[in-house]
């Protein structure tokens, strides 16, 4: 069973896309701001509990076809057992993190677009 909310996964997807695309590359002062997005993403992933982090890794693995969606529980257990570095370092070292997370969500029957749209809707 997935032990992280779709909203938290979508938050990581959105921030990973911002970081990868350099959307926030320049602040008003002309200094690079990509580092701020990178730091925010790393801190967000680090703030997740162990179960949420393992689920996030499992969704990424499912998205890149390391595991099938029917193997979600096994992927989560493997993520917990094989963790050897901080989860944020591992995930942020994956160049296609946002794409893999979205593909994993879709494979698990979660619409990434709906969740992302909900997060980005103005209040």
Image: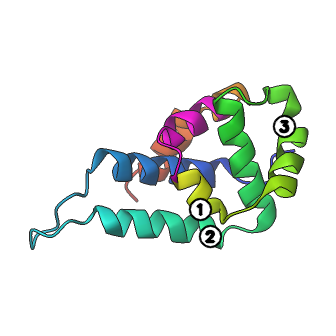
Q: Nearer the viewer, residue 60 or 120?
A: 60
Q: Give the CA distance from mark 3 to mark 2.
A: 21 Å
97 magenta-colored? yes
Q: Are marks 3 and 2 in contact (CB under 8 Å)?
A: no
Which residue is at a point 50% across and 41% down the rendered structure image? Answer: 98
How crowded is the residue under tag 2: few (<14 C-alpha within 10 Å), some, or many (20+)?
Answer: some
Quarter of the image with the N terminus in it: top right
Which residue is at a point 9% across and 68% down the rendered structure image? Answer: 30
Q: Which numbered disc flags the more N-terminal residue, 2 or 1?
A: 2
Q: Which residue is mark 1?
A: 88
Q: Is residue 99 left or right of residue 35?
A: right
Does 100 sit above or below residue 81?
Answer: above
**Label number found at residue 46:** 2
Q: Are marks 2 and 1 in contact (CB under 8 Å)?
A: yes
Q: Nearer the viewer, residue 12 or 67?
A: 67
Is residue 110 visible in the rendered image? The answer is no
Residue range (magenta): 93-104
Q: Which residue is mark 3?
A: 72
């Amino acid at each position: 069973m997935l032990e992280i909310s779709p909203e938290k996964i979508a938050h990581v997807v959105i921030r990973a896309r911002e970081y990868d695309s350099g959307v926030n590359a320049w602040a008003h002062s002309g200094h690079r701001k990509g580092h701020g997005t990178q730091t925010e993403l790393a801190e967000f992933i680090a703030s997740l509990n162990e179960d949420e982090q393992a689920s996030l890794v499992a969704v990424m693995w499912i998205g890149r076809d390391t595991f099938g969606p029917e193997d979600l529980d096994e992927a989560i257990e493997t993520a917990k057992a094989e963790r050897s570095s901080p989860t944020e370092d591992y995930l942020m070292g994956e160049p296609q993190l946002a794409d893999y997370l979205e593909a994993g969500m879709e494979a698990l029957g979660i619409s990434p677009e709906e969740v992302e749209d909900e997060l980005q809707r103005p209040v």
